[in-house]
Amino acid sequence: FWIHYKTQQPTMVPPIVKFALPILMITMIKSYFDTSDPFTIFWFRIFFGMGQFMVIASLIYIYFEIPKSPEALQKVKVTNDDLEQPSPFDGIFNQGDDEKNNNDKDKDSKRFKKITFQEYDLIVWKRKFKQTCIAITIIPILHFLFGLTVPLVMSVLLNVMG
């Protein structure tokens, strides 16, 4: 989520924007840019490098700002569900589990745990940093091995959106 600069309240990118932007961007890139032109590929690479550099720089800045927050040491109650990202494959691969394991998982996920805001922020930060590092590794491999150019631009835009 993002923090609104005046109210300091968390704001999220509206779901319709998260859904529609990738489709619109892919359509625009494919329609208006010749993705096989070396000049275009050069600028897509520059955009990828500068965009991911800015994301990493922002994440490093945020990492050092987290402990400076006045609320950093306040406690908050969270569940395991709050700390773990949901997997889109949970419903597919966990169908064979027996009922007892599902009940144990439900009980564990509903238990509250008290952690500080700083600890919670660092958990979320590590998740985002890991996601960014994976993108910075995989996208250039896809580009150089298979010649894919659209992911260079899309990965930066989607990374900034969260």
Image (cartoon, rainbow, N blue to C red):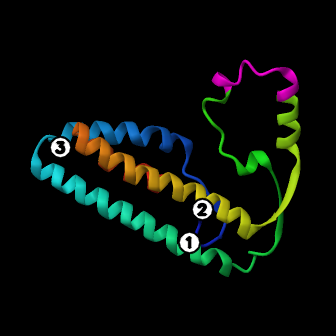
Q: Is residue 99 above or below residue 30?
A: above
Point out the frontmost of discs 1 and 3.
1
- Give the secondary structure at mark 1: helix
Q: Is residue 66 left or right of residue 28?
A: right
**Looking at numbered disc 1 in the image, what kind of residue is underneath it?**
Ile
Q: CA distance from mark 3 to mark 2?
A: 34 Å
Residue shown at 38%/51% (left/top)?
A: 137
- Residue 19 position within the rendered picture, expressed as x and y whole percent measured from the top left: 48, 38
**Do the residues under discs 1 and 2 have CB atoms within 8 angstroms?**
yes
Label 3: how many Cα within 10 Å (few below 14, some 14–19, many 20+): few
The amino acid beneath tag 3 is Phe
Q: Inspect this view and state whether residue 144 appears.
A: yes
Q: Which residues are magenta?
A: 91-101
Which amino acid, mark 2?
Answer: Trp
The answer to whether 38 appears left or right of 71 in the picture is left
State the residue position of label 1: 62
